[in-house]
Amino acid sequence: LMQLRQKGSIVEYHEAFEAIVARLDLIEEHRLSCFLGGLKQEVQMLVRMFQPNSIRWAFTLAKMHEAAIVHGFVTKS
């Protein structure tokens, strides 16, 4: 889990993350920390800025950032 990193889309990363986490008994705070730590650096910084309190909220924020890049509202760093 600690070695999982986002390489493709946020949806692909979230699916891989959930597949691993489903087999582990971790508290939400630790799961969230692991999820955030595996995001691409530029996505991670933006998501952390909003201080998400759940993986669902962090995932939603990351998807919004990804969509903004795809639609040209922001540029990749």
Image (tube, grey):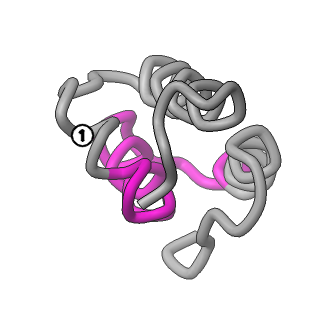
Q: Is residue 16 magenta?
A: no
What segment is highlighted magenta in the picture?
21-44
Q: Is mark 1 on a helix, strand or loop?
A: helix
How many tags in the picture? Answer: 1
Number of other residues with Cα within 10 Å of mark 1, as a class: few under 14, some 14 to 19, many 20 or more: some
Q: Residue 34 location, x and y as percent?
A: 42, 57
Give amino acid for label 1.
Arg
Question: Could you say where residue 42 lies in the image, as x and y percent from the top left?
Answer: 38, 56
Q: Which residue is drawn at 38% across and 42% down?
A: 32
Instruction: Please name the residue shown 36% across and 51% down the image.
Output: 44
> Measured from the top left, where is residue 35 in percent x and y?
48, 50
**x, y percent for residue 74:** 47, 35
Which of these two is toward me, 66 or 22? 66
In the rendered view, tell whether residue 34 sits above or below residue 55.
Answer: below
**For this rendering, which residue is in front, 27 or 66?**
66
Q: Which residue is more in the foreground, 58 or 72?
A: 72
Prevailing SS of the magenta stretch: helix
Q: Is 54 positioned to the left or the right of 46 in the image?
A: right
Q: Does the magenta stretch include residue 37?
A: yes
- Residue shown at 41%/61% (left/top)? 77
Q: Name the residue under label 1.
A: 48
User: Where does the N terminus fall, quadrant-wise?
Assistant: bottom right
